[in-house]
Amino acid sequence: MNIGNLSFERTKQAVLSGTPLRGEALSRFVAGVADARGHDAADLLHQARTIRLARLGRTVSLCAIVNAKSGRCSENCAFCAQSSHFGTSAPVHPFLETEEIARAARTMRDLGAKRFGIVTSGLKPGGEDFARLLDAVRAVDALGMEADASCGILTPDELEQLKKAGLKAYHHNLETARSFFPAICTTHDYEDDVRAVGHAVAAGLHVCSGGIFGLGESWEQRAELAVTLGELGVQSVPVNFLHPIPGTPMASRPVLTPEEALKIVALLRFVLPDANIRICGGRQTVFGQTRGLEPLEAGANGLMIGDYLTTRGLDAQADRQGILEAGWEISDD
Ligand code: SF4
C-alpha cells in the first residue's frame, strides 16, 4: 500500500535502518494503517513480522501473573472489573499468603513462564501489604523466576526496597493515550502514571508498560500511546484488548475484530521496533479459543499465559505447544 509516497515496505526499511517513525511520516503511516484492508492489511502484518524477526528473532517470551490482591480499587478506570466505582462480579480478596503466591509461580514456571508478576489492585499497597509484597517478591525470586510486580504508583524508595528483595521488573500501564485518558479515568492524572513508569526506569528495573485497546480510542491515539512509551524507554509493552465487563461503563462496547487487533500490534511494532510486545488480556475475546497466536505473526514476540486478572486464560500447555508447532522458539528470558 502506498502511504502518500511511501509504502509499508519502504517504511519498514526506514525503521530497520534506524530512523524512528515519528512526526509527519508517522501520521501518514497511521492513516495508511487505518485504511488498510485485504491485501494491504496482509502486507502491513508481513512487514511488521519482518521487523520483529530482524530485531528480536524467532523467540517468544512467556510471562504469567497472579492477582495477589483483588478488587475494591479507589480508581475509576472505565474498563476495569476491580474498580469500586462499578458493580461487577470480579473477585475481591485481601493480599494472598506468600505460600499461595509461590505455589502459583511454581505452577507457571513448570509450564514455561520465566517471568511472574505479582499484581495488586489499588493505587499502591500500603503498610502491611507492602511488607507482604516484599515477602512475595523474595519467594518468587527464590524459585529462579524473574520476579515482577504491578502494584500501582510507587515511590523511588519503595522501588529500591523491592529491588533489594529481588524484583527484576516493574509493570505499570499507561492504559491509553494522554489525549484519551480523561475519557477513561478521572480519579488520577495521566502524569501520575507517567511518573510511576519514569521512577521504575530510573531505578534500573526492566520496565513493562502498555495499555488496553478497543476503548474507543482513535488510530492516532494508539500511535500517540506508542510514542509516549518509546520516549519513556520501556522495554516491554503489554497489549490488552478490551474484554467488556458487565457493570463497567465499557460493558456494551464492541469487541475489536481480529483484523483491527492485528493492525494495532503491527502499528506498535513499527513504532517500537525493539520492544518486547506481549499479548495479554483479551486474547481469546478477540481471537476465540483456538486462534490466539495470530499476533505473533503480526509483530508480537511475547504472550501472557495462564489466567488474567479477572478473566480466565487459555490452557498454558496448549499455548506452549501451539507456539512450538508454529515454528517459534520459547525464549529463556
Ligand atoms: S486499572 Fe488498576 S487503578 Fe484502574 S481501577 Fe483497575 S485496579 Fe484500579
Image: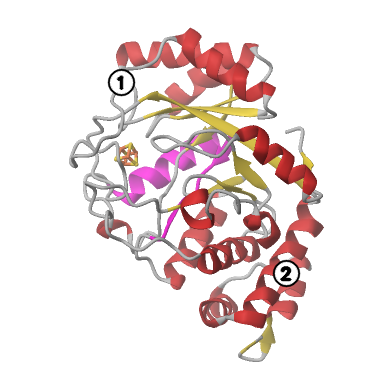
Q: Give the residue at x 46% y 36%.
A: 312
**Up-down relation of residue 167 to residue 210 (above or below):** above
**Up-down relation of residue 264 to residue 279 (above or below):** below
Mark 1 or mark 2, earlier in chain: 2
Q: Amino acid at mark 1?
A: His
Q: Residue 174: x, y in percent?
A: 42, 49
Q: Nearer the viewer, residue 278 or 222?
A: 278
Q: Residue 300: x, y in percent?
A: 65, 54
Kindly tell me whether residue 281 is visible in this rendering: yes
Q: Nearer the viewer, residue 199 or 259?
A: 259
Left/right placement of residue 68 relative to residue 170 reads left
Q: Amino acid at mark 2?
A: His
Quarter of the figure that contains the C terminus: top right
* SS for callout 1: loop
Residue placed furthest toward the bottom:
5
* SS for callout 2: helix
Magenta stretch: give its range.
189-214
**Up-down relation of residue 258 to residue 329 (above or below):** below
The question of residue 201 being in magenta is answered with yes
Q: Residue 280: x, y in percent?
A: 53, 45
Q: Nearer the viewer, residue 138 or 119?
A: 119
| Residue at mark 2 | 46
Q: CA distance from mark 1 to mark 2?
A: 44 Å
Residue placed furthest toward the front:
290
Quadrant of the displayed image that contains ligand 1 = top left
| Residue at mark 1 | 93
| Res. 131 image quadrant | top left
